[in-house]
Amino acid sequence: MNVDNEITIKVRDLSKRFDKLVAVDNVTLDIMKGELFGLLGPNGAGKTTLISMLSTMLQPTSGTATLNGYSISKEAINVRRSIGVVFQDTTLDEKLTGRENLELHGRLYGMPRDLRNRRIKELLELVELDQRADDIVKTYSGGMMRRLEIARGLIHRPKVLFLDEPTLGLDPQTRNHIWEYIRELNREERVTMLLTTHYMEEADSLCERIAIIDQGKIVALDTPENLKGRVGGDIITLTVSNETGAQKLVDMVQASDDQIDFSSITRNGTNIMITVSNGESAIPELLSIISRGSEIKVINVNLRKPTLDDVFLHHTGKKMRADTMDDMQRLRFIARTRKK
Ligand SMILES: Nc1ncnc2c1ncn2[C@@H]1O[C@H](COP(=O)(O)OP(=O)(O)O)[C@@H](O)[C@H]1O
Ligand SMILES: [Mg+2]
């Protein structure tokens, strides 16, 4: 971790409204220099809208933000010089080679040829595309394209790199690879990174701090460990054969407050979720309660540590779920728009 005490992105009461819809709702946050910061939230939470404002592509409705000391509304040009962006829909030119795409971008930033060439070589090696640099992008796999885009975002040595759902639609193995590149680039380039994702395990394993965003609002912000720690110790889930039995079990656990040290209990149909400080000692107690209830037939018991999904549920009362169907629909949409 190369985080300094210096604030690189400072957001104050930032909001964006589209007609009646509040896409980003009074967001305040500080992102430190060198930090790998994650915005985690379901589709439609406002993640893209928030980073679109921070990267000056979208005007805020109200509020302020500075990036690298520059105001996003008053000093947009300086902000743009300070950032690199890797957004959801690719803007790579598929008819050009990987190297040509990088060159084009370097020229756009007015980089002198020597510096540009040195930088391109360095980045191509870093994302392991040096062997394929002179092939046209059309022949690249999805993961290779994403790596090229990440390299391109870093050409001009930006202070901040925005990554909007950098692994969307990639297979799990390629996703893991991209995570490694992101980690390495964050370390080697000492660049502040703000990435958005709706994959919980991605935010968990990659980010130093996470802001959980729902309906435009930040509902929690901390390190993944602290976020999970605050949910409580362990989570026991039980499946009971019928709803009457499940409700009876909930009632019995609630009535035996002194026997089981639980912080929350919820029922969803025949499934029960109990948060306890110590799962190993709570399970025997639970079994003894179950044995007293004649209509209660438990068909499944599971004990686990909280995940970020539990954190989301804890703060919003909703499940975040990684909906693969939604991903597929969005990818088809991206594929369609790209053909035009
Ligand atoms: N240009 C726009 N016009 C109207 N509504 C928009 C526009 N862009 C985004 N939205 C809406 O704002 C909300 C947040 O969208 P978005 O920031 O794309 O969420 P996320 O990136 O978290 O999936 C959604 O309800 C979306 O439909
Ligand atoms: Mg988005």
Image: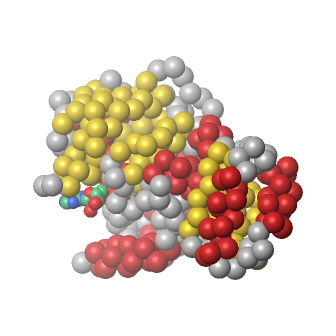
Q: Is residue 304 above or below residue 84?
A: below
Q: Which image quadrant: the N terminus?
A: top right
Count how many numbered circles sit on residues in the image. Answer: 0
Q: Nearer the viewer, residue 287 or 67?
A: 287
Q: Which image quadrant: the C terminus?
A: bottom left
Query: Is residue 46 at all visible to an observer of this figure?
Result: yes
In this picture, residue 101 sits left or right of residue 124: left
- Picture coordinates of residue 192, whole percent (x, y): 48, 35
- Picture coordinates of residue 169, whole percent (x, y): 49, 70
- Picture coordinates of residue 330, whole percent (x, y): 38, 73
What residue sits 28% from the left and 43% below the top?
25
What residue sits 53% from the left and 50% below the top?
314
What residue sits 48% from the left and 28% below the top?
32
Q: Is residue 163 above or below residue 170?
A: above
Picture quadrant where residue 245 is located = bottom right
Q: Is residue 252 above or below residue 34?
A: below
- Picture coordinates of residue 84, whole percent (x, y): 38, 44
